[in-house]
Amino acid sequence: MQPGVCVGQLYNFLITNAASGIACRRWDQGGQDDDVVVVANLANRSDDSNSIGFPREGLWKVRFNSDWNGYRPDFGNQLSYDTTAAPPGADNMPSSGNVGIGPYTTIILSQQPVTLLGTTRGAGSMT
């Protein structure tokens, strides 16, 4: 599991009243093996493509999507996709990338592979 999910620093960098969303960066020491970006949609509508800030360039993979219907069959299973962050930055972060998110959903993105108990987990959960 990424250290940034469990401990460390928290920086809220996007809070929108119109879109009813919040995004934050969590980290312990900082860096590719540590940073995570958490995005929450507090609205009753999905957002298929929203540009947000990321702490560095490169591929950011969705590790958790709370709308995944593997948790419950009646969940919407809205697509939340991996993104490649690049300049220019956004939200006081040096890079930006697009994310999609379902209604009343939280997603977690990180850069490095996450292993739990020696295995890599599948879609919808930590991967």
Image (cartoon, rainbow, N blue to C red):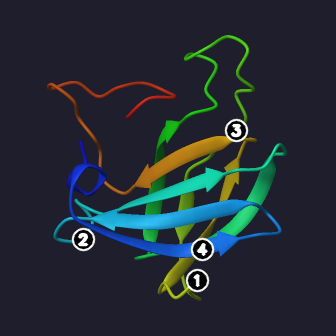
| Residue kind at label 3, given as amino acid type | Leu
Q: Residue at x 21, y 64 (%)?
A: 8
Task: Give residue 77's position: percent from left, percent from top.
Answer: 70, 27
CB contact under 8 Å: marks 3 and 1: no
- From what the image shows, is residue 70 above or below residue 76? above
Of badges 3 and 1, nearer the viewer stands 1
Please name the amino acid that badge 2 sits on: Gly
Which badge, 2 or 4, comes first in the chain's sequence? 4
- Secondary element at image label 3: loop
Label 2 belongs to which residue?
31
Q: Identify whether 17 is placed above or below 121.
A: below
Q: Residues within 10 Å of mark 3 (few under 14, many from 20)?
A: some
Which one is nearer the viewer's eye here, 93 or 43?
A: 43
Residue drawn 70% across the image and 38% down it: 79
Q: CA distance from mark 1 to mark 4?
A: 6 Å
Q: Which residue is mark 4?
A: 14
